[in-house]
Image: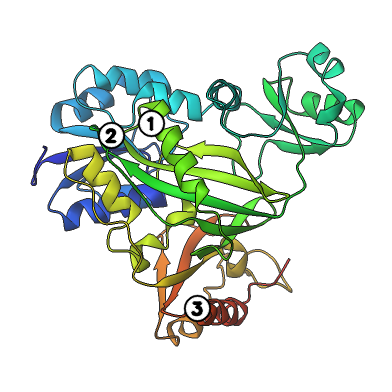
Amino acid sequence: MILPPATLGMLGGGQLGRFFVLAAHELGYKVWVLDPDTNSPAGKAADRHLCAAYEDFAALDQLAQHCAAVTTEFENVPANTLDYLAKFVPVRPSADAVGICQNRVAEKMFLRNNDIPHAPFAAINSADDLRNASPELFPGILKVARFGYDGKGQARVTSREEALHAWQAFHNEACVLEQMLTLDYEVSVVLARDEHGNTRSFAPSENAHAHGILDISISPARFDVSTAQGLAERIAEQLGYVGTLAVEFFVSRGQLFVNEMAPRPHNSGHYTVDACATSQYEQQVRALTGLPLGDARAHSAAVMVNLLGDIWYDASQPGPDAHGHYREPDWSKLLAYPNLKLHLYGKHHARPGRKMGHFTVIDTDPVKAHEVAMAARAAIGIRNT
């Protein structure tokens, strides 16, 4: 075990990394963050912020020299960076596991090879791949293999012609063409797995998206999707995964299909900070350092609502005012609710679609939690889409 007050390394400086830093500090660890953004939320909270690129080997050498173990808060850290650091310190999750999750083609092949339910798909590397794709893939969704998230790098296509135009718009990058399923709802499972194969899964959450970005997560899910936990645990085992992992599922005509995996904590698991004995971020710290995993049981029902940069703008006059100032939301409207927990990420500036914070409403009664969350959401100016 790596015990406090050891120093831990975090690749990535976003809000997920910030929550990791806070959880590590509560356990008595120090944290260094490597991120190229001078205003990164995690970097502001860390003991030291190495403001450098993820392939800056001088910065990586500093991280390896001063940190007892290293993890990541997002999947697009180059696998070569993880491999390099692993020569000197424990890196969890491994470069191999992250490499599968960060490439949609590798991810879909992993699911296929392990008989894990997924939507029909085809790897697209050329125009001929689209011309020869099975008719069952239309209508479908064309997704870039790398770097697409929150609805970016995706296009709905109803025909080969539309798919070809979309592929060209993606600059002929490697893609996945996936059959568009009839969607009942979406759920996700966040779990933690240690180096000995012990696993702790949080209850599945039910998720709703707006414009490709997570809007609301409800836990526990209002449907019986208990089998999702077993599938997520099977994925973690097959990956040899160590750390916190999220698995997103589509439910189509009552059947579960894996949508994608995230080798890190997940937006839909934010609720664990306020509603569970151990948060997904503390589990990440524990798995990284070899501490026993914590209790993942929930003590409350929870509804999490994302706060995007849109609400920093006046709907009648989008953008900053004449002085270049953004409108700060009236947080008193949220803080008036005694069972609402507000989390702001400290990002440097707001812009539409940017995740600026979230709030979670907890209650012993899941119906009440949902009612309060919807009322608070409306009070702060979030409109239904």
Q: Which residue is mark 1?
A: 237
Amino acid found under the numbered disc labelled 1? Glu
Question: In terms of sequence position, does the residue under pointer 2 or pointer 3 come before the other?
Answer: 2
Q: Which mark is residue 369?
A: 3
Which of the image's four quarters has the C terminus? bottom right
Q: Is residue 3 left or right of residue 49?
A: left
The vertical placement of 372 against 125, above or below, is: below
Whether residue 44 is situated above or below residue 141 in the rendered picture: below
Is residue 39 at least partly visible in the picture? no
Residue at the disc numbered 2: 197
What residue is shown at x 23% (from left), y 53% (from top)?
Answer: 294
| Residue depicted at 59% across the width and 24% down the height | 112
Label 1 or label 3, whichever lies nearer to me, is 1
Mark 3 Cα within 10 Å, few/some/many (few <14, many 20+)?
A: many
Mark 2, Cα crowd under 10 Å, few <14 / some 14-19 / many 20+, is: some
Residue 166 shows up from this direction: yes
Q: Between disc 2 and disc 1, whose residue precedes?
A: 2
